[in-house]
Image (spheres, grey):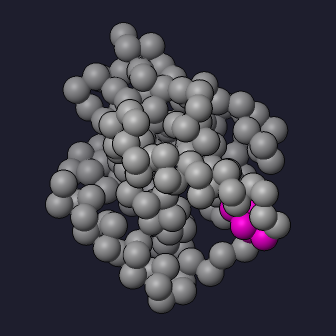
Amino acid sequence: MPGTGFGVDVRIGDVETVLVYLVRRFHYEIDELREGDVTGWRAPSRVRLEQAEGNQASGTAVAIRPGSYPPGARGGFFAHELTVIRDILAECDGVVRWGGGDERPYEALFSIDVPPGDRRLTALVTKLRNWTDEPGLGAGSPVDVTDTERRRAADALERQQKAA
């Protein structure tokens, strides 16, 4: 995971590109992550497959500090951290779902929320990969998460995902 000093097991390819981007933004903008703070793939026997965490069994989800943000608990993040999380999700164009917005919250969990081969995933990956070639764009680049347009996009996505 570039810029963090550790790795995480996730599905390689497009899913990896998106989840690595998300974890890097968390690392840079919310709190520095260390080895062991992020859990990717987990054996199917170790997750509740009927819950959102079941996505970890396919390598399409990560849990960031799962011991700090356990399933069922809400309110683990400060307001400015929630703003960054919502901005990351909006920047990912609805391809990623945050477990903290679910009826039974799991604030540590971030998962791919589109089926394999979905054109939204492909478009997001193209955008993220283009950013790596452009100085000043992508994870680690300064963004104003309080910008009116960014907040509107984040709020709209939050309403859409809560309704789903």
Q: Residue furthest bottom?
A: 148
Q: Is residue 8 left or right of residue 34?
A: left
Of residues 94 and 68, the one nearer the viewer is 94
Of residues 86 and 73, the one nearer the viewer is 86
| Residue sitting at x 56%, y 43% | 19
* Res. 114 in view: yes
Residue 137 within the magenta-colored segment of the rendering = yes
Estimate the x, y position of residue 105 in percent, counting from the top left.
30, 48
Q: Is residue 94 left or right of residue 13?
A: left
- Image quadrant holding the C terminus, namely bottom left
Of residues 149 and 5, the one nearer the viewer is 149
Q: For the magenta stretch, what is the residue range?
A: 136-141
* Res. 107 in view: no
Estimate the x, y position of residue 92 in percent, counting from the top left.
49, 58
Estimate the x, y position of residue 94 in percent, counting from the top left.
38, 57
Q: Is residue 115 left or right of residue 40?
A: left
| Residue sitting at x 34%, y 27% | 54
Residue 57 within the magenta-colored segment of the rendering = no
The secondary structure that most of the magenta stretch takes on is loop
| Residue sitting at x 62%, y 54% | 128
| Residue sitting at x 61%, y 42% | 17
Estimate the x, y position of residue 91 in percent, counting from the top left.
51, 64
Q: Is residue 32 above or below residue 45?
A: below
Q: Is residue 88 above or below residue 14?
A: below
- For residue 106, what is the image quadrant? top left
